[in-house]
Amino acid sequence: MIAAAELRDRLAGLEPIGLGPGGTNRLAWTEELAAAEAWFGEQAGAAGLRVERDPAGSLWAVPDGPGPWWATGSHLDSVRSGGRFDGALGVAAGFAVAERSGGRVAVIAFADEEGARFNTPTFGSRALVGRLDGADVLARADDDGIVLADAMRAAGADPDRLAGAPAWLERLRGFVELHIDQTQDLERLGAPAGAVRALASRMRLALTFAGRADHAGTTRRAERRDALAAAARLIVAADELAGGDPDFLVTAARMLVEPNAFTTVPSGVRLWIDGRAPDPVRLTAWRAALAVRGEELAAATGVAIELATASHTEGVGFAPEVLAAMGDLPELVCFAGHDAGILAERLPAGMVFVRNATGVSHAPEEHVELEDAAVAARSLLGVLERLA
């Protein structure tokens, strides 16, 4: 039986990697992630699985027997100053399940699920299903000016092989991911684990505001082209355009300001806005309305505003046969993006969630009880046994 102590022991070698006073930092294609991948190799060896890296840089721990296999797992990278369980728990539980599967289950750690360094969320899974614009993403640079293609090479992955990733999809029969609940839904239901019925539609917008630097104390209001003031107004507009729907979620997720000086009117802003809704049509309409607001604001302020879609994932329902195999687990709708949701476009897929009493995630305070995680892992094992 999979117990909490086993999951604790498995995580013990992974949790310290990238962990500091401000949380966990294991960004894609870094030394910290390389150390986490070494942990993955150790876990695979103990489970009798061999490790392979696919053309997108994802790690596969596969049985010696012939595929295709059912697979489980998640990701090892984190957001900046993130939590200890997001992604990591799914990989650790995946090895516990694979050890008990009789050589019928593979474990995958998908590359760059969070997209925190290059704004490339679900990189590995999107490459696997052939839904990644390689020319675009490989040319993206991080905050230090390092280009993604170069970062991949330094980490031991070959960006020139990226287009070959979809061929690996034939090795899978399906995929079921264990992940922490990033809401309090399971806590409200009083359940340690749940089955995810569907993922909501998600969109990440990248906006650029180009104004003019001026003296903060001598430049009159009518003479200013304040990029930050324009960005603030568009952030408010993005929230207002969502209306009163509690399930339409809008977040101004990240902002970079230039020159970022005490006595200078801001000349430039880069802003990322995250929008999520169960209804993909409403999300698309929201983006169009925000673009119109941006044009109006640019005309009124003299600040040039560019709006681009950095990523867009339609909502997806998980496979009926996978949901049927979940038994009596309570069903949920998830508003976060996950690799299982990407694979669901091409394969039977599903997700098992672990209760998170506070709902806090992507933060150092993220926490789950490992007893709940063990319940979810046992459910995952049962699901994969029934499917395999």
Image: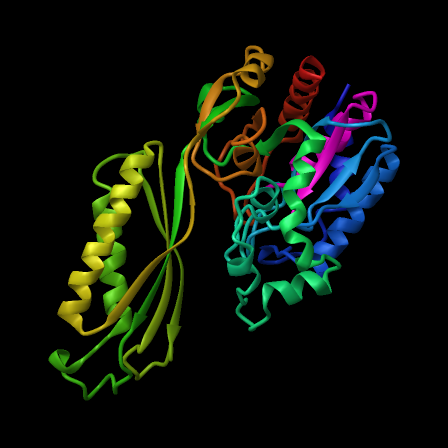
- Whether the magenta-drawn stretch holds residue 71 is answered as no
Instruction: Report the number of numbered marks.
Output: 0
On the question of residue 60 being in view, the answer is yes
Report the coloring of the rendering.
Answer: rainbow
Q: Give me the residue at 71% from left, 17% from top.
A: 388
On the image, the x and y values in percent for residue 222 come to: 11, 79
**Nearer to me, 28 or 96:** 28
Q: Is residue 136 above or below residue 72?
A: below
Location of residue 326 by image quarter? top right
Residue range corresponding to the magenta coloring = 86-111
Q: Give me the residue at 54% from left, 30% from top.
A: 344
334 vs 244, left or right, is right
73 vs 194, left or right, is right
**Nearer to me, 323 or 345:** 345
**Nearer to me, 166 or 64:** 166
On the image, the x and y values in percent for residue 131 come to: 52, 44
- Whether the magenta-drawn stretch holds residue 89 is answered as yes
**Nearer to me, 58 or 16:** 58
On the image, the x and y values in percent for residue 201 come to: 39, 37
On the question of residue 7 being in view, the answer is no
Location of residue 333 by image quarter? top left
Rendered-image quadrant of the N terminus: top right
Q: Is residue 380 above or below residue 293?
A: above
On the image, the x and y values in percent for residue 220 come to: 14, 83
Q: Give me the residue at 66% from left, 22% from top.
A: 380
